[in-house]
Image (cartoon, rainbow, N blue to C red):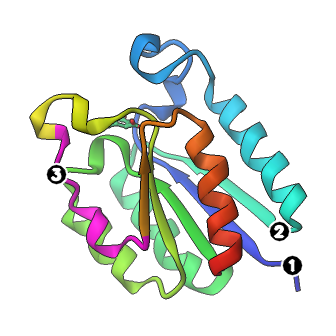
Amino acid sequence: MTRTLLVINGPNLDMLGTRQPEIYGHATLADVERLCRETCDELGVELDFRQSDSEAEIMGWIKAARRTAAGLLINPAGFTSTSVAILDALLIFEGPIIEVHISALFRRDAFRHPSLVSKAATAKIEGFGIEGYGFALRKLAALG
Ligand code: DHK
């Protein structure tokens, strides 16, 4: 059976391309999905690509992924520093998890530095723009 990798994008990532391009670049979420799809096609794995502004919806997807996904990429976006609930859901997932941030958080506002979800992550990639997604998927395919 073909393995599936789940990519979850958190709040406001649907606005990529128009949202603070000096920080997030000009690529849209559709460009990110295309990059992920090409990478997964090359790796011979299925892609399940999602975005939500809702913490509850994201938690539901993570919990359902226990039965459907071999690995999980999450960009928790604005929930990174606030969501114990997303951390708790990720701790239930048994496969590898890679946390991805497009921007370099360590160069930005101090309130963005702490990540509550990292405790559940196998690894974290930040500051490589949308290319971080491709790298993370390659690693997930190798680990999952
Ligand atoms: C995306 C966001 O929406 C912000 O809330 C994070 C992250 C950074 C990113 O770089 O992908 O602080």
At x 58% / y 15%, what residue is drawn?
Answer: 26
Q: Is mark 3 within 8 Å of ligand 1?
A: no
The kind of secondary structure element at disc 2 is loop
In the picture of the structure, the residue carrying the numbered disc 1 is 2
In the picture of the structure, the residue carrying the numbered disc 2 is 45
N-terminal label among 2 and 3: 2
Residue 69 appears anywhere in the view: no
Residue 79 appears anywhere in the view: yes
Distance of mark 1 from mark 3, alpha carbons?
A: 36 Å
Report the span colored magenta. 112-122
Residue 130 lies, in percent from the top left, at 58, 35
- Quadrant in which ligand 1 is drawn: top left
Residue 16 lies, in percent from the top left, at 53, 24
Residue 6 location, quadrant: bottom right
Distance of mark 1 from mark 2, alpha carbons?
A: 6 Å
Q: Which mark is residue 119?
A: none
N-terminal label among 1 and 2: 1
| Disc 1 + disc 2, Cβ < 8 Å | yes
Query: Dot 2, how many residues are within 10 Å of its Cα: few (below 14), some (14-19), or many (20+)?
Result: some
In depth, the one of 85 and 120 nearer the eye is 120
Whether residue 38 sits left or right of residue 19 in the image: it is right
In depth, the one of 129 and 18 nearer the eye is 129
Q: The disc labelled 3 sits on which kind of residue?
A: Pro
At x 51% / y 12%, what residue is drawn?
Answer: 18
Q: Which mark is residue 114?
A: 3
